[in-house]
């Protein structure tokens, strides 16, 4: 950034997580000149720590949030179309331990109890799934629910506890790369509004007379003047508001942690489906296949420190014990964990309410301009991954109203990133692969891999690879040219951006010291890093993985 540069924007969005990125794309599509900034990487905060589900919120039926369920199921169905390269159907099963329990507790919760219900029986689950189908009928993409007998359930999943009486089955969806979807929203916004900008690793340090002061992590500074500010900083919202002249107390976050297990036998029993189950304390947990591992989550613990959040030993033990109770036919231990992650949900301040019952709905409080701050601030509170587009549209409408500008287009049917011109059936897919292979020189099977991983963006990567892709050391399904293309085209600043967010190499448990050194050399060549910078990036990555993800790498042995 250039020192003392002074730029005017219609809107400055602080925080490039899923909600900020969604608002950025929507406003850019309306022709506004926008700037989005994040003190870390795009999608590196709470948006990097979800359960990887795009779901309609089955459990929100218990709290009577029927509008949220209707919105969530509709948005899930839209994402299955608009981001089909990253969002895919996920078969889900609910192990049920009784026939009629939980009805009284559920009624208490529905009418305002602040304690979570426990032991949801078959009648309650059946009613919930029927309502879920009803609310999911708008733009339906997937089959309706079914109830399966105990005998068939144990035949299908022999490791399940024999305490079950039935199994409820339905479909939700999984997102294979949430951080990539955040990036693609930002890239789509930049294409729609060429005067707009997106800057990662850039903090807002203050405001004076309507100008925001920005500082990047290389200590360069810049001043920008917004007509309006959208604070999408998630769990950091109140801190950011304080920096820019607004005292707020909107957030009362909770921590959600997850672990990934290297457990082939568990994956065989899951057979591509998710188990959505109840722990002994009544909390709903889940386990499903993800990137060749088994993802387990999540906890819901009050916490307000997003800069230090990490999965604790107690949380890990909680997950392991819950799996032992659910699947006594399998062995579970800490040695199977290859990756862990945690984030703070930016939930509304709700003192005295059980964390699991705090609403996942969203709100956008509006703080008008003042004499010392001549721009209004709209703060994005709450929300969930699945409903980001609806939340973004709501906020964009508020912005357009404030700035007295018209809405030019809706986003309901707007494809995201690699979903543009994505082949819609097997025949079209085969034609696309054949054409791309002929145009790029890449082998058809390789084009197929890239299409599945990146959508139609895979065409550009296939062209960059050509006929002679070089496999990455210790990760042969990825290539040197693929990594090089990502670094040059996807705003990579640090090594961790690439390994934790632009690719699934970290979360899949694929990282080795040798792989990290190999990738670091590719990044260094593309970004012209010095040898000192390359080593500093490796050191920072090693410390981050150990502190936040429970991954301990030996880079020294990678030299041998």
Image (cartoon, rainbow, N blue to C red):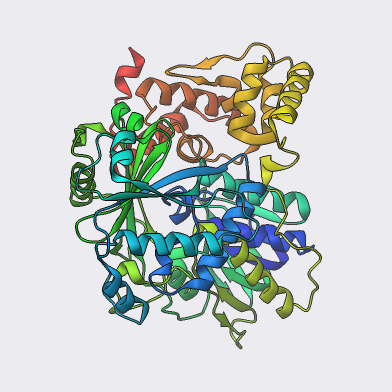
Point 35% across, 77% down: residue: 350
The answer to whether 210 appears left or right of 125 in the picture is right
Of the pair 483 and 459, the residue shown nearer to us: 459
The answer to whether 468 appears left or right of 502 in the picture is right
Residue 219 at x, y percent in the picture: 52, 52
Point 58% across, 75% down: residue: 378
Point 27% across, 67% down: residue: 102
Q: Is residue 348 visible from the viewing direction of this image? A: yes
- Residue 509 falls in which quadrant of the image? top left
Residue 205 at x, y percent in the picture: 51, 65
Point 29% across, 28% down: residue: 265
Of the pair 28 and 385, the residue shown nearer to us: 385
Residue 201 at x, y percent in the picture: 52, 51
The answer to whether 498 appears left or right of 263 in the picture is right
Residue 471 at x, y percent in the picture: 53, 15
The answer to whether 167 appears left or right of 523 in the picture is left
The quadrant of the image that shows the C terminus is top left
Of the pair 172 and 441, the residue shown nearer to us: 172
- Residue 507 falls in which quadrant of the image? top left
Name above or below for residue 496 compared with residue 285.
above
Q: Is residue 222 visible from the viewing direction of this image? A: no
Tell how many labels.
0
- Residue 390 falls in which quadrant of the image? bottom right
């Amino acid at each position: 950034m250039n020192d003392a540069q002074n730029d005017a924007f219609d809107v400055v969005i602080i925080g490039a997580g899923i909600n900020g990125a969604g608002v950025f794309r929507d406003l850019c599509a309306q022709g506004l000149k926008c700037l989005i900034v994040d003190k870390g990487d795009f999608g590196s905060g709470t948006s990097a720590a979800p359960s990887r589900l795009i779901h309609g919120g089955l459990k929100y039926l218990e709290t009577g949030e029927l509008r949220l369920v209707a919105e969530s199921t509709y948005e899930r169905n839209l994402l299955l179309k608009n981001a089909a390269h990253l969002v895919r159907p996920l078969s889900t099963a609910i192990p049920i331990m009784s026939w009629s329990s939980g009805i009284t507790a559920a009624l208490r919760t529905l009418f305002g109890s602040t304690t979570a219900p426990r032991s949801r029986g078959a009648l309650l689950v059946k009613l919930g799934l029927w309502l879920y189908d009803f609310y999911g009928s708008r733009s339906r993409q997937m089959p309706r629910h079914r109830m399966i007998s105990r005998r068939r359930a144990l035949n299908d999943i022999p490791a399940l506890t024999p305490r079950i009486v039935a199994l409820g089955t339905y479909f939700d969806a999984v997102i294979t790369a949430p951080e990539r979807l955040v990036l693609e929203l930002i890239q789509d916004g930049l294409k729609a509004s060429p005067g707009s900008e997106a800057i990662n690793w850039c903090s807002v340090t203050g405001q004076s007379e309507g100008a925001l002061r920005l500082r990047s992590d290389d200590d360069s500074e810049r001043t920008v003047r917004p007509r309006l500010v959208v604070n999408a900083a998630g769990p950091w919202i109140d801190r950011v508001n304080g920096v820019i002249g607004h005292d707020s107390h909107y957030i009362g976050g909770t921590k959600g942690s997850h672990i990934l297990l290297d457990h082939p036998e568990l994956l065989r029993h899951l057979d591509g489906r998710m188990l959505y189950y109840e722990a002994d304390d009544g909390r709903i947990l889940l386990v499903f296949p993800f990137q060749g591992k088994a993802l387990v989550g999540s906890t819901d613990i009050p916490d307000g420190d997003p800069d230090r959040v990490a999965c604790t030993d107690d949380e890990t033990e909680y997950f392991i014990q819950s799996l032992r109770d659910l699947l006594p036919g399998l062995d579970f231990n800490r040695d199977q964990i290859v990756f862990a992650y945690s984030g703070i949900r930016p939930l509304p301040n709700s003192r005295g309410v059980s964390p699991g019952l705090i609403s996942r709905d969203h709100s956008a409080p509006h703080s008008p301009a003042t004499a010392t701050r001549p721009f209004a601030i709209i703060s994005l509170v709450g929300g969930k991954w699945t409903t980001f587009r609806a939340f973004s549209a709501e906020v964009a409408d508020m912005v357009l109203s404030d700035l007295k500008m018209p809405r030019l287009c809706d986003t309901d049917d707007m494809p995201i990133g690699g979903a543009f011109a994505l082949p819609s059936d097997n025949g079209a897919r085969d034609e696309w692969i054949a054409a791309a292979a002929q145009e790029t020189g890449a082998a058809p099977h390789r084009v197929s891999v890239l299409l599945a991983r990146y959508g139609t963006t895979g065409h550009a990567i296939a062209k960059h690879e050509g006929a002679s892709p070089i496999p990455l050391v210790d990760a042969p399904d990825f290539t040197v040219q693929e990594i090089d293309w990502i670094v040059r085209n996807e705003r990579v600043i640090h090594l961790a951006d690439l390994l934790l967010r632009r690719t699934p190499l970290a979360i899949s448990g694929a990282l080795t010291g040798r792989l990290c050194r190999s990738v670091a050399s590719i990044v260094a060549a593309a970004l012209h890093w010095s040898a000192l910078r390359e080593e500093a990036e490796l050191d920072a990555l090693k410390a981050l993985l150990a502190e936040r993800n429970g991954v301990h790498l030996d880079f020294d042995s990678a030299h041998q």
